Amino acid sequence: MVFGSILLIAVCGGSGLWLAARIRRRPEELRQCLTALSLLDTEIRWGATPLPEACTMLQERMDQPWDGFFAELGTLLRQGQAARTAWEETIRRQRPAFCLRPDDWKVIGDVGKGLGRSDREEQHKQLQLIQHQLEAVRTQAAVWAEKQAKMWSYLGFLLGCAGVIFFI
């Protein structure tokens, strides 16, 4: 009985901590996306780097899960897919590897709309606009994540204790 009680509290508490960690990852993933878009903008605007090569460079410089995102994007671009189609396909395939919400993906998805379709200056303007939008989303996500992560951390252990009381 004691072992079962401890196990129930540990499992519920661990689940709450796991969920809290995923919630805390969202602002970090958004920050990494901002960094990646800034690097992409630099490569397009100043380096005049072709998009597949820029993706390879980003893959090498980014951490998980963004390195996988740009690896797949680069592969699709080298296979001859249009930038917009490759961007949307990469989002669809890579989405489960991230802790981002659907609203975040809508903003990130806007990158593909102008990627490779206009001159460098227009792409720069679009990337800057999306970076400003993502920064606002990241700021809101950081505040939300801190509150939610604390709540789920405590709630997991409390639910475990409530379960023990219920079964006693």
Image (cartoon, rainbow, N blue to C red):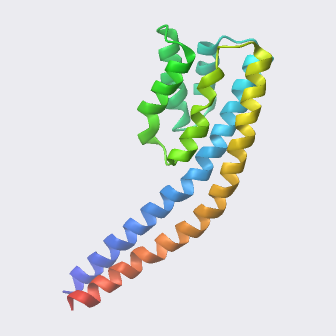
Rendered image quadrant of residue 13: bottom left
Q: In the image, is 66 to the left or to the right of 118?
A: left
Could you say which quadrant of the image residue 49 lies in? top right
Does residue 93 sit above or below 142 in this rendering?
Answer: above
Q: Position of residue 52 (x, y in %)?
A: 59, 14
For the view shown, which residue lies furthest in the top direction? 80
Residue nearest the observer in this picture, 51 or 87: 87
Residue at the spot x=72%, y=37% of the render? 131
* Residue sitting farthest toward the left: 1
Q: Is residue 12 above or below residue 110?
A: below
* Quarter occupied by residue 113: top right
The spot of residue 78 in percent (x, y) is: 51, 10
**Residue at the location (54% across, 31% down)?**
67
In this rendering, would 144 be left or right of 100? right
Q: Tell me the quarter of the image containing the N terminus.
A: bottom left
Seen from the viewer's position, the closer of residues 81 and 55 is 81
Residue at x-position 57% and y-position 44%: 104
Relative to 111, say whether 160 is above or below: below
Residue 138 coordinates in the image, percent (x, y): 66, 50
Q: Where residue 87 sits in the image (x, y, percent)?
A: 53, 24
Please tell me which residue is depicted at 62% across the width and 45% down the height of the picture: 30
